[in-house]
Image (cartoon, rainbow, N blue to C red):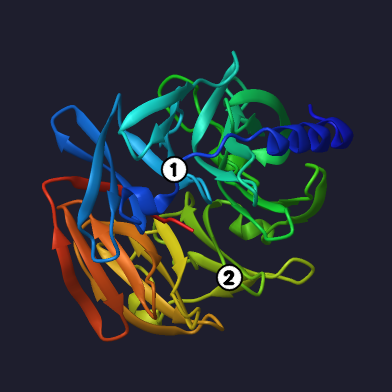
């Protein structure tokens, strides 16, 4: 495990030796990145402009999940669907795979990642394959050499979000899975949490829900400018139970669970696939491909409106107010209180996540 001194020393050395590369303007200033499927076994990563039109399309070796974008260079990392054995660093100016990352022996990627604020370090969500114990993999982002790892303080980490001060929030979903076929092994013993790591990787705070909600796997995160984390959950308990799938948490405080309207409590079918704050952060929303809906709440967590759309999942802030969303039929949507408005349509069947650059 990287120590504070060795990690910070490594970051400084990397930062001092970074070779300038093309910025995002060189590839048309894409606003969004999304993985998808174009044929029976054909997978791609797209860069989209703010209107949802594709600026580049790069093949992936297997199904992708989420991605993350370098803060300044025209580089994106596409992650395999968990449990994953690849993460591709893609030069978005040339379409070339610049680096092919593989997890250490005995570990697997878990679908998400984030860069440090200066772009010198890539952090990857990982598990120890046999136990599902969580790890954050650390890679220097010049040559993408592995430089260490941190423990996440939980089982089955998935999404992660970096605060401006260098802290890292990790959604530990709590589900142990078979390393070969994703069979869930511990549903009756789940204990998910949301862990906050300091800039050196030490656990500074852990948020857990009440015991009756431990079957609610904390999966995906969104971070507002004021430090509020929105977390989306997936229910593994009694299918007849109506439980909240969205929560809001400020480190140092108790979480606030956001209840759907009673008549819509079962609409999402216990599954929130993505979460995002709106561009102006006046709204927060979750999507459900299983329920075919996006549910919008106000900033305090009160339900505002629900819109229906089959297989809707990808969700990210719009450049102004509202959201941008994608579905499994290839559509890109502008989403606001007033409804869903078609922005673009593609032959690509979009996967679960839509990632905003910057």
Where, by quadrant of the figure, is residue 240 drawn?
bottom left
Picture residue at 15% right of the left edge, 62% below the top: 344
For label 2, the residue is: 224
Picture residue at 48% right of the left edge, 33% below the top: 184
| Residue 206 sits above or below residue 316 on the image | above
Label located before the other in sequence (1 or 2) = 1
Picture residue at 63% right of the left edge, 35% below the top: 18
- Residue 246, given in percent of the width and then of the height, sits at 50, 67
Q: Residue furthest top?
A: 105
| Residue 190 sits above or below residue 91 on the image | below
> Tag on residue 281?
none
Label 1, label 2: how many angstroms apart (C-alpha)?
A: 29 Å
Where, by quadrant of the figure, is residue 19 drawn?
top right
Q: Residue furthest right?
A: 5
The secondary element bearing badge 1 is classed as loop
The secondary element bearing badge 2 is classed as loop
> Tag on residue 22?
1
- Residue 216, given in percent of the width and then of the height, sits at 54, 54
- Residue 153, given in percent of the width and then of the height, sits at 73, 41
Left or right of 358: which side holds 263?
left
- Residue 293, given in percent of the width and then of the height, sits at 28, 67
């Amino acid at each position: 495990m990287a120590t504070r001194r060795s990690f910070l020393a490594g970051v400084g050395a990397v930062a001092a030796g970074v070779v300038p590369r093309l910025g995002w303007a060189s590839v048309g200033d894409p606003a969004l990145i999304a993985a998808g499927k174009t044929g029976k076994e054909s997978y791609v990563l797209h860069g989209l402009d703010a209107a949802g039109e594709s600026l580049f399309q790069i093949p992936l070796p297997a199904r992708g999940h989420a991605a993350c974008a370098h803060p300044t260079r025209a580089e994106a990392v596409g992650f395999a669907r968990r449990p994953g054995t690849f993460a591709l660093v893609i030069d978005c100016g040339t379409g070339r795979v610049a680096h092919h990352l593989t997890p250490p022996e005995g570990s697997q990627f878990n679908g998400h990642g984030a860069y440090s604020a200066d772009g010198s370090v890539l952090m990857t969500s990982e598990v120890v394959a046999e136990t599902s114990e969580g790890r954050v993999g650390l890679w220097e982002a010049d040559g993408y050499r592995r430089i260490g790892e941190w423990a996440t303080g939980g089982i089955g980490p998935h999404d992660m979000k970096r605060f401006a001060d260098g802290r890292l929030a990790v959604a530990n979903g709590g589900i142990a899975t078979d390393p070969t076929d994703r069979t869930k092994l511990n549903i009756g013993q789940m204990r998910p949490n949301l862990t906050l790591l300091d800039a050196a990787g030490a656990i500074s705070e852990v948020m857990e829900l009440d015991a009756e909600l431990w079957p609610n796997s904390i999966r995906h995160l969104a971070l507002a400018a004021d430090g509020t984390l929105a977390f989306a959950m997936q229910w593994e308990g009694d299918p007849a139970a109506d439980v909240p799938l969205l929560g809001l948490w400020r480190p140092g405080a108790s979480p606030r669970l956001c209840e759907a309207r009673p008549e819509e409590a079962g609409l999402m079918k216990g599954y929130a696939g993505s979460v995002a704050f709106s561009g102006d952060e006046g709204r927060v929303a979750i999507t459900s491909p299983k329920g075919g809906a996006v549910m919008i709440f106000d900033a305090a967590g009160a339900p505002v409106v629900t819109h229906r759309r089959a297989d809707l999942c990808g969700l990210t802030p719009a450049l102004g107010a509202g959201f941008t969303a994608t579905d499994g039929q290839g559509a890109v949507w502008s989403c606001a209180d007033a409804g869903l408005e078609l922005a673009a349509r593609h032959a690509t069947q979009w996967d679960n996540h839509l990632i905003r650059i910057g």
